[in-house]
Amino acid sequence: MAKSETTSKPAAKAASKTLKSSDTGHHSKSSAGSALSQHKAPSKETGSKAAFSASKTLSDGRTASASKSAAGSALTQKPSKKS
């Protein structure tokens, strides 16, 4: 079942900034793309590859705050594990 969260406007702007940057790495762009695709789309979820990228983005100390914001939004929208 899809989560009802969507990417907020500030997080969507951060994701857009991340995708436009030529200095941004693959993991940051992957998670930013996922977050941006979920702006105003509550039925969409973050896939496992994008969630992995978001996790890598958040744990990398060199990552810009805009990229971390987008990654956090994407990770929030990952479906929870089934027990």
Image (cartoon, helix red, strand yellow):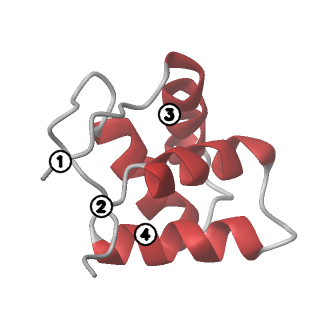
Type of the residue with mark 3: Ser
x then y, percent, for residue 63: 78, 61
Residue 66 position (above or below residue 80): above
Mark pair 1, 2: CA separation: 7 Å
Which three-letter amino acid code belongs to the residue tagged 1? Ala
Tag 1 residue = 2
**Mark sitting on residue 51:** 4
Residue 3 percent across, percent down from the top left: 26, 44
Rounded to the nearest angstrom, the CA distance separating label 1 from label 4 is: 15 Å
Identity of the residue furthest to the right in this view: 61
Do tag 3 and tag 2 residues touch (Cβ < 8 Å)? no
47 is higher (above) or lower (below) than 3: below
How many angstroms separate mark 3 from mark 1 (CA)?
Answer: 23 Å
Q: In this image, 18 relative to 76: left or right?
A: right
Q: Are marks 1 and 2 in contact (CB under 8 Å)?
A: yes
Residue 79: image tag: 2
Tell me if label 3 and label 1 are in contact, CB under 8 Å: no
Badge 4 element: helix
Looking at the rendered structure, the secondary structure element under dot 1 is loop
